[in-house]
C-alpha cells in the first residue's frame, strides 16, 4: 500500500522526456488537485482503449466510427499522393500548415544508426498496394532532416524500390527553415536553399 | 467521443511544466503503450484518493495507517525541532541528506511578490500549538534562497512573532552550494560562506 | 595609469556577445599570456587597417592587391548572378557550401522592425549598375529566415523594383534545414519543404 | 599578407570560451569599428606589460607604484587573515561582497582530477612565511565548491600541514547560495545549510 506514490512516480517516469524528479512532481501535483479532476484523468486514460482506434490504413490513432480514420475516408483528399511520416504528431504539424491534402502513412518510429528502432514495413506495403488501386502516383518520404530521418529514408528507398516503375518517390525539400541564419547554416541547407530559390 | 485525445491532452497540460506539445506527446505515448500499462496508470491515479492521505499534523501527503504520517509518528525523531518547508518534494531532498531528524510542517506553497500564493497559516499555528506541548524549542524556516522564499520567510516571522518568547526561530545558513563558483557568487552567498567558514 | 585593466575591459565589452565578466576574463587571460603573444595580438589589430581593405565592389573586407577583392576579380565566377547578403560571415558559410559561384554584395546589416539598422543602398545601386554592364541576369536576396531578414528583403524589393524589367529577383528557398524535425516545423517551413520536394 | 584576418581569428580563438565562429566575428567587428577604437585597443593590449604588474606578495595582477599591490600595501587590512583563492576574478567578487578585509594569495589555477593544472606552491610558502612574521593567524581556503576546487583544497591541506601548529586552516562554509532551491539541493549543501542555520 505504501507504494502508491512510488509506483505512480515510476509510471510517469516512462513518459517521454520525464525524469524521476518531474515524475514525482506530477504525483504531488495530482495529490493537490481536486478529486474530480483526478477521477476525470483516470477515466480518460482508461477510456483511451475504447474511444481511440488505430486506423488500419494510415496507422494513426484517432476517434472514428467507420472502417478508417477521417483523413483516410475523406473523399476530397488527393488519392495520388501518399506521405510517409514518422509519428502521429507530425500529421498535426502538417495539417496545421494546411498545404498538403493527400493521404498519410505513419511509420510508428524511425530507424537509428545503432540498429534500434522499428517501422511498420509489412503494413506499409499493404497500404501501398491498396493505394495503388486508387490511383497512387507519388510517395513522399517526409522524414525529419536528422541522421535518423535520413537513415530511415535510405531504408524506405530500398523497400520501395520495386514500386519505382509505377510511382514517383520524393523527399521533402531542403532550405532555410524559419529562424535559420545564413551564418550558421550548413552546406546541405544552403545548397538546398539556393537550388530551391524562387521569384520574389 | 472524438474529444478523448483532446480532452486528455488538456488534462496533461495542467501538469507542472508541461505545454500543449508535450501534453499531446504524452497522449500518443499512452496510445502506443500496452493496454495493461494504461490500465495500471489509470488505476493508480484513481486509487490515490484512498491510498494516500494528507497528514493532519505536518500536512504532507503519504500512505499511512495511523492518525499521522510516518515522520510525525516516529518516536525517535527530535520533538524540539520543527522545520517549515514549502512543499512535499523538499522533504524528499532533506531526508536524502540524512542530517535532520526533527519534525516537519509543509506550507503547501510560497507567497509571491505579486501577492499571489497561499500558505497554511491556520494549520501551522495549530501544529505549533500541539508541538509546544511536546517540547518544541526551535522552528527552522527552511525556504529556498529565492525572492519568493525570502518573502515567505518574512511573512512567517511576523506570524510567528508571538512565539519568540518560547521558541528560537532560525533560518537555513547561506554559503557555497555544491557547484558554486566564487567568481559568480553574489555578496550574500560569499558573506554567508565567509561567516560560516570552518576548520578544515 | 590604474585604468589600464578597466579600460581594456571596457574595450572588450564592445565586442559582440561579450558582457562585463567575460571582458574582464579576457584581460586576465592576456595578463597570464606570454608577452610575445600579447605583442603579436596588439600588432595584428594595429595592422588590420593597412592589411585589410573593403572591396569597392562587393563591400566585404579582405586582403587583396588589385582594385577589387578575390571574388570580384575572379574571372571564372558567374557574372549573371549577384547574391545580396547581410554580412561578411555569411559569405564564409556560402563559400563553404561550395555551391554558389556568382558575385556578392554585402549590405553591412539588416533593417529592424523598430526602424533601426542600415543598409548600403547607394553602394548597392552603383554595384548593380556596374554589374548590369557585365551581364547581370539575377539578383538573389540571401537574407536569414528571421523577421529582420524578411523585413530587409521587403525593403530591397522596393529598392530594386526599377530593375525588374532587366533582372530576375529571387529569394532563397524555404524547406527543412539540417536538424529540422517535422513535429516542430512551422507552416512556412513545411509548405516550402513540400513545394520543393524532389525525386529521391 | 592575406593571413591577417585568419591570424587574428586564431589569436582570438585562444581567448577563454571563444570558438572559431565568434573569433571570426570579433575580427569583422573590429574591421567595422572606427580606426581610432582599433588603435586604442591595440595600444591598451601593448601597454599591459608596462602598466600592469604581478604583485610579488599576493600574485594578483594590478597597476601599482610601490613594491606590492594596493591590497597588500593597505595598512587597514587585517594581517591575521590570508585567503587563498584560485584566480584574480575571484577577488573582484569577494571585494564586491565587502565582507572580507584580510590579505589574499592567488593560486593561479586549480588542480584537476586528471592530473593537469598547476598552483604556485613555492610562492605560497614564501608568502605564508612573510605573513607569519606579520601576525598571520588563519588561512582560509576559498576554493569553488566544485570537484576541482575540493581536490585543490585537499592538496593545499597537505602542503599547509606543517603550519597547523601556528595557524588555523579553514574553508568557506557550505549552505544555500542565492537562487538555491531546496528541492534540487544536494546533501552537502543541505547539511551545511542546516548546520549553519542562524537566528532569524
Image (tube, coloured by chain):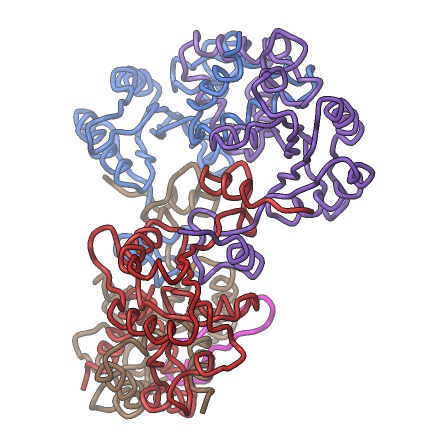
Chain colours: A brown, B red, C blue, D purple
- Decide: is D91 above or below B192: above
**For the magenta stretch, what is the residue range?**
A105-127
- Residue toward you, D46 or B175: B175
- In the rendered image of this protein, does residue D77 appear above or below residue B33? above
Quadrant for residue A113, please give it. Answer: bottom right
In the picture shown, does residue C17 fall above or below D179? Answer: above
Image side of residue C59 versus residue A77, left or right: right
Residue C164 in picture, x, y percent from top left: 20, 30
Q: Position of residue A138 (x, y in %)?
A: 34, 69
- Compare residues D25 and B108 and report the one nearer the observer: B108
- Check the image and name the residue furthest to the right: D162
- Do we see residue A125 in this rendering? no
Q: Nearer the viewer, residue B38 or C20?
A: C20
* Left or right: C61 as drawn, with respect to D9: left
User: Where's residue A24, x and y in %?
Assistant: 42, 73
Residue at 44% in and 35% down: C100
Residue, far front? B165
The C terminus of chain C lies in quadrant: bottom left
Which residue is rendered at x = 48% and y = 51% of the image? Answer: B173
Q: Which of the two residues, B127 or C191, is positioned nearer the viewer here?
A: B127
Magenta stretch containing residue B134, yes or no? Answer: no
Amino acid at each position: 500500500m505504501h507504494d502508491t506514490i512510488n509506483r505512480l512516480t515510476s509510471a510517469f517516469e516512462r513518459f517521454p522526456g520525464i525524469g524521476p524528479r518531474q515524475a514525482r512532481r506530477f504525483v504531488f501535483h495530482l495529490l493537490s488537485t481536486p478529486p474530480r479532476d483526478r477521477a476525470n484523468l483516470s477515466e480518460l486514460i482508461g477510456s483511451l482503449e475504447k474511444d481511440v482506434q488505430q486506423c488500419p490504413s494510415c496507422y494513426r490513432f484517432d476517434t472514428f466510427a467507420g472502417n478508417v480514420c477521417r483523413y483516410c475516408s475523406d473523399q476530397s483528399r488527393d488519392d495520388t499522393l501518399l506521405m510517409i511520416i514518422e509519428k502521429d504528431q507530425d500529421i498535426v504539424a502538417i495539417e496545421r500548415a494546411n498545404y498538403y491534402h493527400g493521404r498519410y502513412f505513419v511509420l510508428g518510429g524511425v530507424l537509428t544508426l545503432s540498429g534500434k528502432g522499428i517501422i511498420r514495413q509489412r503494413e506499409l506495403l499493404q497500404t501501398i498496394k491498396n493505394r495503388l488501386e486508387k490511383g497512387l502516383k507519388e510517395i513522399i518520404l517526409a522524414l525529419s532532416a536528422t541522421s535518423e530521418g535520413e537513415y530511415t529514408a535510405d531504408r524506405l528507398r530500398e523497400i520501395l524500390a520495386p514500386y519505382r516503375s509505377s510511382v514517383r518517390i520524393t523527399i521533402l525539400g531542403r532550405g532555410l527553415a524559419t529562424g535559420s541564419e545564413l551564418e550558421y547554416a550548413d552546406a546541405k541547407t544552403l545548397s538546398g536553399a539556393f537550388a530551391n530559390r524562387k521569384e520574389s
